[in-house]
Image (cartoon, grey):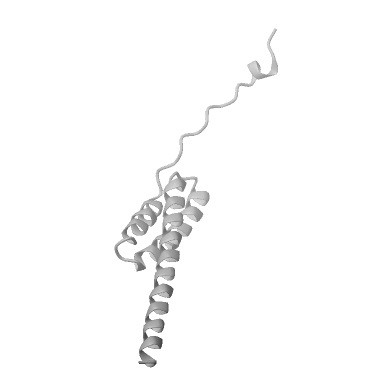
């Protein structure tokens, strides 16, 4: 006896669309941000744009965009922490030199 699933088989999943180029650019810019810190900001912007395009166009590459976002935000955070630490060291040195 046939069951309902035998009469109406589940269609195979559709193949994913082409990889979104903006997602690859986002990842590349974020990796470049390790050498040129402002590039990480471009990676974050491209990552957000790529994820929006991927959802709208049913493309693949969301993991590339997400990796670009995570790396870009991490590098921006580390850059800001470095600037704050450097500023603190400079302020401390000028403070010590003021008392000499």
- Residue for point 37% across, 83% down: 93
Identify the residue shown where x is 44% and y is 41%: 17
Q: Between residues 46 and 13, which one lies in front from this camera angle?
A: 46
Horizontal side of residue 48 vs 100, given as left or right: right
Q: Residue at x 44, y 44 (%)?
A: 60
Q: Is residue 2 left or right of residue 88?
A: right
| Residue 45: image location, x then y, percent | 44, 63
- 43 or 92: nearer the eye? 92
Nearer to me, 94 or 10 = 94
Image quadrant containing the N terminus: top right
Residue furthest out toward the top:
1
Q: Which residue of the protein is positioned furthest toward the left in this rendering?
A: 35
Is residue 2 shown above or below 10? above
Quadrant containing the C terminus is: bottom left
The extreme front residue here reads 100
Q: How many marks?
A: 0
| Residue closest to the eye, 89 or 32 | 89
Residue 44 image offset from top left, x and y in percent = 44, 61
The image quadrant of residue 97 is bottom left
Q: Is residue 39 above or below residue 27?
A: below
The residue shown at (59%, 25%) is 10
Query: Is 89 placed above or below 36 here?
Result: below
């Amino acid at each position: 006896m046939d069951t309902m699933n035998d009469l109406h088989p589940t269609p195979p999943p559709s193949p994913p669309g082409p990889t979104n180029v903006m997602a690859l650019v986002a990842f590349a810019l974020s990796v470049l941000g390790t050498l040129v810190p402002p590039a990480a900001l471009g990676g974050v912007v491209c990552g957000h744009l790529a994820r929006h395009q991927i959802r709208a166009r049913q493309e693949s590459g969301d993991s590339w965009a997400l990796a670009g976002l995570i790396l870009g935000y991490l590098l921006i955070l580390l850059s800001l922490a470095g600037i704050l630490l450097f500023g603190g060291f400079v302020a401390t040195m000028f403070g010590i030199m003021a008392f000499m």
